[in-house]
Amino acid sequence: MNVPSEFPPSAASSDGKAPLSNRSVLLRFALIGAVLLLTVFAFGYVGGWLAPSRLTAQRMINQLQANAGVFPGYRRNHAKGVCVAGYFDSSGQAQTFSAAQVFAPGRTPIVGRFAIPGGNPYAPDGSVPIRSMALRFSQANGQQWRTGMNSMPVFPVATPQAFFEQLQAQQPDPATGKPNPAKIAAFFAAHPETAAFLAWVKTAKPSASFATESYWSLNAFVLVDANGEKHAVRWRMVPENGETATGGSDPNYLDADLTQRLAQGQQRWHLIITLASPGDPTNDATKTWPADRREIDAGTLVLTSTTPQESGACRDINYDPLVLPDGIQASDDPLLPARSAAYATSYLRRTSEEAHLPGTATSQTEAKR
């Protein structure tokens, strides 16, 4: 092979070192080229360009958009929501199982968000029976704990792929503007793990208030104590106010109800942590754990105020469930990394659309209102 003339083997080195041989020069160019190719390959793999059928966070968010439409500046799921603020008073009872500062006796400030599922920020509150609660605990040491919970005890499916297929089955038919019941039925028939969720749905009704709901973590996590020992757990927020009324005909009654309740006083929940026993599944959110598992009342969540999501502190928070402080770790549940990646993709899209004021853009899909 001819070597380019600009790399003569006899070229003198200005620093007195022996000049590189032609072979050494070629090897260095080959190494640089290999690094560049690997970089391109890595970007292609992560971006899904090399395997278009592989499930990625981008495809997951694209499917959510296909189902609900695109509403610039809003979250791609749980788009309709409201910000809340308050604090968490730890009881100290969870301190034995976790070194996280939030579980030491004392008060931790929180910024939270209530929402309903779906990508349409104009959906009526009574359109779905599920409500969600997201919280960011800000510890004094600067670490944060972010968690997103839903008002149902189990998740429909156990894997990101199954959730993606569920979304595909629920995509509106262009001819009718509504999901095809046959496709939905076929999906659930092919996924027997959805049985527990379907049983819950049959009795679930849209509640009249965010403040009267319990909210489950659904995914398992791991608490790590001061000695480094690990304890698999799930948690839920249980309201002190257990009213069971269903909502009215006003499409936005949840926001109005929360404002009225907080004007009259604080709203309170207890953080109940359930400890797993050996053999309890930690990688399958479709399965509950037996009711006799040990539970701990870790403390009281106190909400004191609410603000619109367009201007509230929750607007710019990505409630990524993998933002965890020392003392709390992710479990082996495959939904957790998928949620984290999808949340990040949704966050990047909405903030890039409305970097100056997310959540206030005019809908591009007026028909979805």
Image: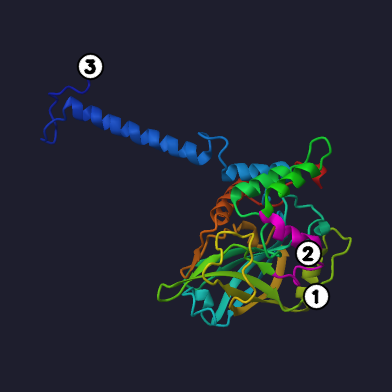
The residue to which callout 2 is attached is 255
Q: Amino acid at mark 3?
A: Asn
Q: Report the front residue among 365 and 118.
A: 118
- Closer to us: mark 3 or mark 1? 1
Question: Relative to 283, is 38 on the left or the right?
Answer: left
Question: Circle 3 — which element?
Answer: loop
* Magenta stretch encompasses residue 209: yes
Q: Amino acid at mark 1?
A: Glu
Q: Amino acid at mark 2?
A: Asp
| Alpha carbon separation for disc pair 3 and 2 | 75 Å
Q: How many marks?
A: 3
Q: Quadrant of residue 92?
A: bottom right
Q: Residues within 10 Å of mark 2 (few under 14, many from 20)?
A: many
The residue located at (64%, 71%) in the rendering is: 236
The residue to which callout 3 is attached is 2
Q: Could you tell me residue 272's position as x and y percent? A: 62, 75
The residue to which callout 1 is attached is 243
Q: Could you tell me residue 116's position as x and y percent? A: 74, 58
The residue located at (58%, 36%) in the rendering is: 53
Range shown magenta:
193-214
Q: Report the front residue among 129 and 23.
A: 129
* Magenta stretch encompasses residue 280: no
Question: Relative to 151, is 333 on the left or the right?
Answer: left
Q: Which mark is first along the chain, 1 or 3? A: 3
Residue 66 visible from this viewpoint: yes
Q: Residues within 10 Å of mark 3 (few under 14, many from 20)?
A: few
